[in-house]
Image (spheres, rainbow, N blue to C red):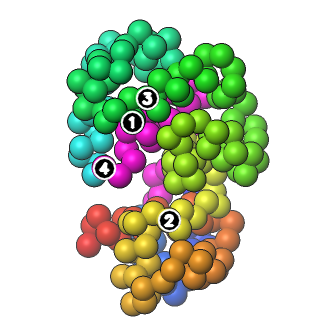
Amino acid sequence: MWKEAERFLRRDKYLGPLVKKYGHCDIGKRKEGDYFASLVREIISQQLSGASATAIRNRLIGRLGGKVTPQEVLQLTIEDLRNCGLSYAKAAYVQDLAERTLDGRLKTKILDKLPDEEVERELVAVKGIGKWTAEMFLMFTLARPDIFPADDLGIRNAMQKLTGKDMTAEKMVKFATRWTSWRTVASWYLWQSLENG
């Protein structure tokens, strides 16, 4: 899916070695029916390690009988969600997301047809979804090719490791223009460089 991006990034002096080392980017587009579940996953993941987020998500999926749908979520109380490991705030966010999806205020069915900025605008109207969560959705659910999450701590650490400089978010955005068109894939390689030394 990302052959052109990989070809382009391989020529970059900073990312070229990472492309060689980590191989093919494995971000893939999720099915439209999974958008609600994807957003629940992104809310759970906020400010948590991958392992903690996965454990909470698995408990929630178990509690929902495997079906992460707005209808199923609204069968649960805030206390039920808390018992799965969600904070009080995240439990409220997940319920707000379910309500907005069911009543049509958030039109999950059309998100993949909207430009990046409009997807972000739709999502940040939901309680608990900010710019970072919207960017993760654009990258990992819709597989949009040119998202650069400059506020992500992992990206910041990877950029510092890559360049030897501690940059502000604005400077990172400016630096990343060299990867324009493929900044999602560039970000994936940056994350890999942290996880895999």
Residue 151: numbered disc = 2
Amino acid type assigned to the residue bearing label 4 in the image: Leu
Residue 109, given in percent of the width and then of the height, sits at 68, 26
Whether the residues at callouts 3 and 1 have beta carbons within 8 Å, the answer is: yes
Magenta-tinted stretch:
24-48
Amino acid type assigned to the residue bearing label 2 in the image: Asp
Residue shown at the point (39%, 35%) measured from the top left: 90
Q: Residues within 10 Å of mark 1 (few under 14, many from 20)?
A: few
Residue shown at the point (31%, 49%) measured from the top left: 48
Please name the residue that numbered disc 4 is placed on: 48
Amino acid type assigned to the residue bearing label 3 in the image: Ala
Q: State how many labels appear.
A: 4
* Residue 101 left/right relative to 13: right
Please name the residue that numbered disc 3 is placed on: 92
Please name the residue that numbered disc 1 is placed on: 89
Whether the residues at callouts 1 and 2 have beta carbons within 8 Å, the answer is: no
Using the image as rendered, state which of residue 91 and residue 143 is in the foreground: 91
Q: Quadrant of residue 114?
A: top right
Q: Residues within 10 Å of mark 4 (few under 14, many from 20)?
A: few
Q: Marks 1/4: CA distance?
A: 14 Å
Q: Residue furthest bottom?
A: 164
Amino acid type assigned to the residue bearing label 1 in the image: Ala
